[in-house]
Amino acid sequence: MSNTLLLLDLEDRYFLSHRRALALAARDAGYRVVVCVRIGGKYMERIRAEGFECLALENENRRKISLFREWLDLLKLIRAYRKHKPHIAHHLGVRNLLHGTLAARLAKTPFVVNSFLGQGSLFSEKSLKFRCLKKIVLSMLRYLHRRKNTRVIVQNDSDKEMVLQNVLPDESRLSVVRGSGVNVLSFLPAPEPPGTPLAVLASRMLDEKGVYEFVEAAVLLKEEGIRIRMVLVGSPDPKNPSSIPESTLSRWHREARIEWWGYREDMAEVWRSSHIAVLPTYYKEGLPRSLLEAAACARPLVATDVPGCRDILKDRVNGLSVVPRDAKSLADAIGKLAQNSNLRRRMGEAGRRIVEQEFSDKIVTEKILELYERMGGAEVKPGKNQAQLT
């Protein structure tokens, strides 16, 4: 029996930051791991250097989606599945699981695992276009999950409810695995740096991540005379219609409303140099990695009370929960933490404990490997890389 596992993810850099631990643990458990990404770039060689076979459907993040290109991507996937003959194909994200499950069916892949990574704008937007698209996508999902060889992973209870209402008839093929895990040996607590408190929003620079509310909150805090530095970390996503233009981000930086640091790979260092982690998102997240990493570094959280965020943020325990789309609520919470170092320390310590007990990458990868094994995969044998995840 083949023990090939194919992981289908969005892009190469996202794979390295979010799936590397899973791929290493699967390899040490006896799987031949093939990594397939939609968008490949300068990180492809780093993935190959880890010992994985790696391929990309595209080498460019295109803004517009066309039916012709979607069809070409599907054909590429079918060829890849037929070439590599995976025993298990694991698809991450709604778009990937739509294409991947269909390709796996046509290529006669024995087992399929589909991970929902939050419901995103498809389920949050209320326009007629998105409502129609949502109905089409849900119909396709129901059809693709009729076969018994498919399993579904969700990251929070809201996604679990959505899947049971719209995709699966019962819980027998559904697993809840909270997040993609955090390496608690890389993201370590550190004393707060001296100086003006630093509040960081780390994400793609999208409207629905609450970036505009973050900037407005920065203005409000400045008007109130509260000493605080407000920093955006991340890059625009040209393919997403709600992406904030680089020109806008640069203008905010020039006008000293906020600081924009762009994309950073060294997020552990970013969190150690910060005092507060912020995510004022207003759509349904999976389980935001930025909050998990910040909590692992013992930083208090300020985030909206939406699915995903509320799975890691325990209000007044390891952070403060705020109202979505409300810059005043956001400013009040950030200001409260900015002026109270003891509160920050106490909440940061609580957040670290929560991550160690519930969200380490060892916990997450073991759950997923157990799922693979139940589906008929390789016997799980923890290896050196899996041991290093503790």
Image (cartoon, rainbow, N blue to C red):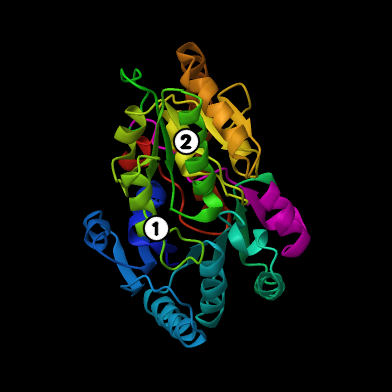
Give the image location of residue 329, x and y in percent. Answer: 62, 33
Callout 1: few (<14), some (14-19), or many (20+) C-alpha neighbours within 10 Å? some
Q: Where on the picture, by quarter, is residue 311?
A: top right
Q: Position of residue 202 (x, y in %)?
A: 42, 43
Q: How many marks?
A: 2
Amino acid type of disc 2? Ala
Q: Residue at x 33, y 39 (%)?
A: 267
Precedes in sequence: disc 1 or disc 2: 2
Determine if the magenta segment contains residue 349: no
Identity, as a three-letter code, of the amino acid under mark 1: Pro
Residue nearer the viewer, 228 or 34? 228
Label 1 sits on residue: 236
The image position of residue 264, as x and y in percent, is 30, 46
* Left or right side of 103 for 136: right
Q: Which portion, as a residue range, is magenta?
A: 158-185
How many angstroms separate mark 1 from mark 2 (CA)?
A: 20 Å
Q: Give the image quarter of residue 145.
A: bottom right
Kindly identify the residue that appears in the image at 36 percent across and 60 percent down: 33
Q: Which residue is mark 2?
A: 218
Q: Would you place residue 357 above or below residue 59 in this image?
A: above
Residue 68 in the figure: left or right of residue 229: right
